[in-house]
Amino acid sequence: MTGRWQMIVALSLCVALFAANWTAPYAAQRAISRDLDLTSAAHVWLIYLYPAALLGVLIPVKGRLSVLLPGLCAFGLASMGAAFAANGAMLIGCRAGQGLAAAIVLRAGFELTREHFRGTEWWPALVIPVALAVPALIAGPLIGAVITDFLSFRWTFLINVPLTVVALALVALFTPRTARHPHARA
């Protein structure tokens, strides 16, 4: 497997992390509402702000890897903030931060894929991360339920921190520093 395909594996793990993080808190709703005394309106914001923030994927980015790595760091920090949120407003703000950071990483990852793959390689390189997102979305509530039942709802966010560190290391190690194709956009 070449460095480009290892990059796709690393980016796929990021996509799976973001997808599971989208749905894992659904299983923790009752515990979150109880511990942070959320109003009905705050509860709606908590659930829908993350996917709404993911619309940030439409924002064009430049720099690819130089944007992707700080985006992953921001996701990890927002996850840590969500884990230690003292109230509903802080948790909602952290969920928005997670969604925006994930959107930045997804967009930069898409651009990196576009930069390093052409022709018949393009579609498989794009489909692999998307294909991993579906089972991660489905597994999210199960993961959230198990974590919440055995630990606390806070761990549904805190578990993202070491996973983000692993994703950072993999993306940094396996992303080629130069475009494979001379006509690729910078």
Image (cartoon, helix red, strand yellow):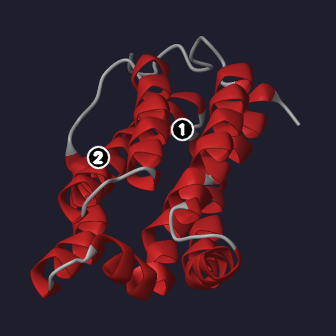
181 to 13, vertically: above or below? above
Query: What residue would you read off at disc 2?
Result: 97
Question: Looking at the image, which residue is at 69% across and 41% down?
Answer: 10
183 to 135, vertically: above or below? above
Q: Quadrant of the N terminus?
A: top right
Query: Furthest residue to the right?
Result: 1
99 to 167, vertically: above or below? below
What amino acid is at disc 1?
Thr
- Proximity of marks 2 and 1: CB atoms separated by less than 8 Å: no
Q: Quadrant of the C terminus?
A: top left
Q: Position of residue 180 (x, y in %)?
A: 62, 19
Query: What residue would you read off at disc 1?
Result: 113
Task: Name which quarter of the figure residue 177 lies in.
Answer: top right
| Label 1 secondary element | helix
Q: Is residue 70 left or right of residue 90?
A: right
Task: Name which quarter of the figure residue 30 lies in.
Answer: bottom left
Looking at the picture, tell me which residue is in the foreground, 113 or 87. 87
